[in-house]
Image (spheres, rainbow, N blue to C red):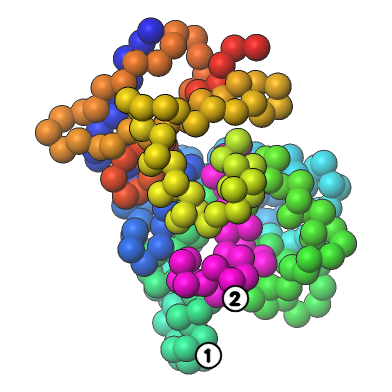
Amino acid sequence: MKTLTLEAKDIGKGNLILVNPSHPVRNAPGKETLVPVHSGYRDVLLEQQTAKMLAEVFSLLDCYHQIIPVSGLRTLQEQETIYADSIRENGEDFTLQFVAAPNCSEHQTGLAIDLAENKPDIDFIRPHFPYTGICQTFREKAIQYGFIERYKSGREAITKIAHEPWHFRYIGYPHSELVEKVDLTLEEYIAWLKQFPYEGPHLQGRFRGRDIEIFYVPATHSGPAAIAIPDQAPYQVSGNNEDGFIVTLWRKL
């Protein structure tokens, strides 16, 4: 076994961070971690792994000419501008539904992408991304690459954002499949995982022929939390941007 130390200052880092009005962005991604989503869209940036997985979905579906990346990473300044412009042009009611307040936007993490069906006159705030054709195929296949449709219809009271069929969030696999299976918003999923603490029963399942184990570790402010994991087992640690960490272990085949 080997020991991992988890420091409270890192709870705002990782694929599973929760970003919303109650959980503002803690850590802006560094420039060295960002890459363009595609050579044809050099100004649309994402975190490296997110961009890689998005490219794999696009390549699988060969949909580069059918689906357009509209908005990826936004700096705080860009989000402030978009928010202020929307208030001025669309009014407060519209903006509160469709534009996250500065520092409350997933776009500031590099883990979120807005996509549009390739048609004339694409709306930057509300791009068209229907539940039919190549867009729906993308929506279904993207789950296997770590993406979820973040803001679904009927969940507005939880997410505090209106239904956005075009907004996809990278949380990594198998979490993307689990979110769909248990039919939860990311807010609910992060809370749900807390019933699987490090010192209690862990969430276990088999995904793509691999045994996977997931558990929650609360952050401690008296010093780093220390946990033991099996030697040579691939693992991933993500903060939840609230109060702790989610650890995912892949058991050996």
Q: Identify residue for label 1.
A: 90
Residue furthest toward the left? 222
From this viewpoint, is residue 56 visible? Answer: yes
Instruction: Please tell me which residue is depicted at 82% across the width and 73% down the height of the picture.
Output: 119
Mark 2 secondary-structure assignment: loop
Type of amino acid at the residue the image marks with label 1:
Asn
Name the residue nearer the viewer: 40 or 107: 107
Graded by Cα atoms within 10 Å as few (under 14), some (14 to 19) or many (20 or more), the crowding at tag 2 reads some
Find out whether residue 151 is within the magenta segment. yes
Residue 116, position in %: x, y? Answer: 73, 66
71 sits to left or right of 203: right
Type of amino acid at the residue the image marks with label 2:
Ile
Find out whether residue 241 is within the magenta segment. no
Name the residue nearer the viewer: 17 or 158: 158
Mark 1 secondary-structure assignment: helix
Magenta-colored span? 149-173
Instruction: Please tell me which residue is depicted at 55% across the width and 75% down the height of the picture.
Output: 162
219 sits to left or right of 129: left
Residue 20, position in %: x, y? Answer: 40, 63
Q: Which of marks 2 and 1 is nearer the N terminus?
A: 1
Name the residue nearer the viewer: 196 or 129: 196
Q: Quarter of the image containing the C terminus?
A: top right
From this viewpoint, is residue 82 visible? Answer: no
156 sits to left or right of 131: left
Circle 2/circle 1 CB separation < 8 Å: yes
Residue 125, disc = 2
Residue 125, position in %: x, y? Answer: 60, 76
